[in-house]
Image (cartoon, rainbow, N blue to C red):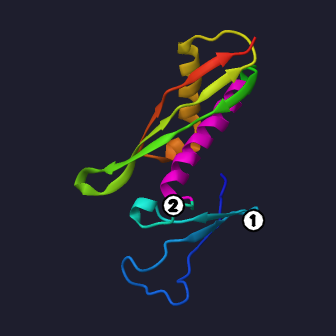
Amino acid sequence: MAEFSLSVAWHLKRGEEFEPGQYSQDHDWTFTGGEVVPASGAANLGGSPDRTNPEEALIAATSSCHMLTFLAIAAKSNLEMVSYLDQPTGVVGKLEGGRKAVTEITLRPRVVFSEGDMSEEDLMKLHESAHKYCFISNSLTTEVKIEPQHEFRT
């Protein structure tokens, strides 16, 4: 078992009123290694557009976990990887009862292998394994779709 901790800090700015719509949503995420990520609410919810928001962070964490799991499986399968690029998207929708949630995340990994040939079916099996063993995906009730692309360099 592993445990992770970090710091999330928000402070009322000097002269700012703590009233609905009157306070800044800007805050900082400080990770164990000391990296500080400026964060805020989503811009369409009154947050700062130049800061990372929790919804984007969830999508990025899902994509990153899938990629790292995929790379581990590929390495164990002696598949030589050249690159992996994903441009994931997420949808905020409503759950039963009207509560909002990230209801769908779509991963679009573009994987480049150094050589060889792989069927679309085999590629999907690799992505299905990565999805099955990804800690983040296993933690979500959100639907995660995978629309992979791949190519081989010769």
146 or 122, nearer to the observer: 146
Q: Is residue 77 above or below residue 32?
A: above
- Residue at mark 2: 49
Name the side, left or right, on which 33 lies relative to 87: right
Give the SS element for disc 1: loop
Specify whether 107 is left or right of 117.
left
Q: Is residue 38 above or below residue 137?
A: below
SS label for mark 2: loop
Of badges 2 and 1, the one in the foreground is 2
What type is the residue that disc 1 sits on?
Gly
At x 44% / y 87%, what residue is drawn?
17
Position of the C terminus by quadrant = top right
- Left or right, residue 2 beside residue 23: right
Q: Residue at x 54, y 14 (%)?
A: 120
Bounds of the magenta segment: 52-74
State the residue position of label 1: 34
Answer left or right for 33 relative to 3.
right
Residue 138's spot in the image, x, y percent?
A: 51, 42
Query: Does residue 15 show up magenta in the picture?
Result: no
Residue at (73, 24) in percent of width and height: 81
Q: Position of residue 67 (x, y in %)?
A: 63, 36
Q: Residues within 10 Å of mark 1 (few under 14, many from 20)?
A: few
Crowd rating for badge 2 (residues with CA inside 10 Å; few <14, some 14–19, many 20+):
few
Mark 2 or mark 1: whose residue is earlier in sequence? 1
Amino acid under disc 2? Pro
Q: Are marks 2 and 1 in contact (CB under 8 Å)?
A: no
Q: Which residue is more in the foreground, 55 or 131?
A: 55
